[in-house]
Image (cartoon, coloured by chain):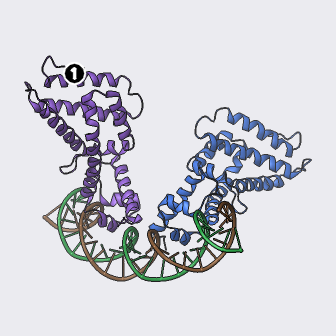
Chain colours: A blue, B purple, C green, D brown
DNA sequence: GGGTGAGTGTTCGAAAACCAACGCTTTTTT
DNA sequence: AAAAAAGCGTTGGTTTTCGAACACTCACCC
C-alpha cells in the first residue's frame, strides 16, 4: 500500500516550512501554528501526521540519521585505507543533496532528537569496533583514540556542510596528516601505515 | 467566500510546474499529464481547475496582462514627462517579482494567449490615445509613431527582464535620447520638449 | 485573585483531491 | 494499413484535508 500523494505533499510542505522557519526562529519558540501557516496546512492535518513539533523533529532526525548510518558503513574503510581524496569527494556528494537541511538540523539539540549527536555516535562506534578488531595491544585507551577519530571526522563533515562544493584544496593533506597521527597510536611503533 | 487553501495550493503547484516545464519543453509538446506528474497532482484535479492546458496558459496570461495594464497607466506619464531614471527603477521593481515567470511566458505565442503581444498592445494603445490628445497636426502618421514608441518600451522591458537587477547604467541616456527623437515627431518644430 | 490571550490537542461535517477506470482521438510504430 | 501507445476528458467511490469549534493549560497583567 503506497502512500497517498496528498500525504507525501503535506509532509513535504510541513517539513520544508519547519526547516525554513528554523533558520529564523529557534526550535523552542516555533509553534505548530507557525509551521501550518507557513505551509498552508491546517492544524488538524498537522496532528494527523505528527503528535507534536517534537515528533516532527524526531522523525526528521531519525530519517537523516538512518541515511547517514547506511553511508558511514560504506565510507568508513576509506579513511582507514588512506583514500582521502576519494573519501572527501564521496562525502561531499553525500552531503551536497542535503546541505541546507543538515546545516539547519545541526543547530537543534533536543533530548530525543539531536542529529549532530547521532552522527557523532555512529562514527564513534565505528572507530570503537575498528580499534578493537586490531590485534595489537593498546598503550592508549580505546575511547580516547575513538573520540579523537570521530571528532576529526565530524569536523570534516561540518566543514563540508558549511563550505559546500568549493575548494577542497589543502584539506586533503591536513586530514591525511591527522589520520596518520591517530592511527599510529594503535599500531606497534615499527608497524606504521604508509 | 474566500477560496479554500487547497485550491490555492493546487493552482500554485500546477502553475509552478507548468512554468518550470516550459523552460524545458515547448508549450505544444507539454501534456497535461506532464504538468500533473511534476506537481504531484492528479489529472482529475487538473480538470477541476482548468479546461485544458490552453485554459491554464490563458488564465496566467490574462492575470499578468491585467497586472501589467494596471501598472502601465501609472507609469506611462513618466516616459512622456522624461522621468527616465524613476521610470527605469519603478519598472525594474515591477518586473523583479515576476522576472522568471514573465521570461518564460514571453516565449509562448498562442492565438488566444500571447503575453508579449498583450503587453505590446497595451503600450500601443497608450501611445495612440496620447498622440491623439495632442493639439498639433501630425505630419507623420499616428500609427507609425505609436508603434515606434511602444516598440522602444517593449525593448526596454525585455532588456530588464533579461538582464535583471544589475546595472541600468548607460541605459537611461540611451532611452532618453530615443524618447526625445520620437516625441519630437508629434510636436511643431519650434515646440521641442526639454 | 480573576481575567485575558496565546498555544495545545481533539472532534466532526463539508469540501477538495485522489485514483482507477472508461471511451475516445491522435500519434507512433511495425 | 493495422496495431500499439500515448494523450484527452469524464466519472464515481474513497481518502485526505480543511475549517471552525471546543476544552484545556500556561504565562502575563491589572
Residue D18 left/right relative to A25? left
Image coordinates of residue A139 in percent, x first then y, are 92, 47
Image coordinates of residue B26 in percent, x first then y, are 29, 48
Pick whichever, D27 or A51, lies toward us.
D27
Quarter of the image where one finds residue A175: top right
Image coordinates of residue B126 in percent, x first then y, are 19, 38
Pick whichever, B182 or D27, lies toward us.
D27
Label total for image = 1
Q: Which residue does the numbered mark 1 point to in the structure image?
A: B193
On the question of residue B140 being in view, the answer is yes
Q: Which image quadrant: the C terminus of chain A?
A: top right
Image coordinates of residue A121 in percent, x first then y, are 75, 56
Q: Residue at x 51, y 70 (%)?
A: A45
Q: What chain does mark 1 sit on?
A: B
Quarter of the image where one finds residue A170: top right
Against A159, residue D6 (above or below) is: below
Residue B113 left/right relative to D16? left
Q: Residue at x 16, y 19 (%)?
A: B191
The residue furthest top is B190
On the question of residue A194 being in view, the answer is no
Residue A40 left/right relative to A126? left
Against B192, residue B145 (above or below) is: below
Q: Residue at x 70, y 59 (%)?
A: A110
Pick whichever, B135 or A188, lies toward us.
B135
Callout 1: SS: loop
Q: Residues within 10 Å of mark 1 (few under 14, many from 20)?
A: few
Q: Residue at x 29, y 57 (%)?
A: B31
Amino acid at each position: 500500500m503506497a502512500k497517498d500523494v496528498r500525504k507525501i505533499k503535506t509532509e513535504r510542505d510541513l517539513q520544508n516550512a519547519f526547516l525554513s522557519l528554523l533558520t529564523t526562529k529557534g526550535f523552542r519558540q516555533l509553534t505548530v501554528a507557525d509551521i501550518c501557516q507557513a505551509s498552508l496546512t491546517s492544524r488538524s492535518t498537522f496532528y494527523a501526521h505528527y503528535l507534536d513539533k517534537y515528533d516532527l523533529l524526531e522523525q526528521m532526525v531519525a530519517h537523516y540519521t538512518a541515511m547517514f548510518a547506511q553511508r558511514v558503513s560504506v565510507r568508513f574503510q576509506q579513511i582507514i585505507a588512506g583514500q582521502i581524496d576519494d573519501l572527501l569527494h564521496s562525502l561531499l556528494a553525500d552531503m551536497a543533496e542535503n546541505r541546507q537541511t543538515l546545516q539547519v538540523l545541526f543547530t537543534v539539540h533536543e533530548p530525543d532528537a539531536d542529529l549532530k549527536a547521532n552522527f557523532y555516535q555512529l562514527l564513534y562506534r565505528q572507530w570503537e569496533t575498528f580499534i578493537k578488531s586490531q590485534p595489537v595491544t593498546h598503550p592508549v585507551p580505546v575511547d580516547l583514540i575513538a573520540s579523537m577519530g570521530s571528532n576529526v571526522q565530524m569536523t570534516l563533515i561540518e566543514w563540508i556542510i558549511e563550505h559546500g562544493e568549493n575548494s577542497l584544496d589543502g584539506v586533503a593533506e591536513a586530514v591525511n596528516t591527522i589520520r596518520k597521527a591517530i592511527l599510529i597510536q594503535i599500531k606497534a611503533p615499527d608497524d606504521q601505515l604508509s
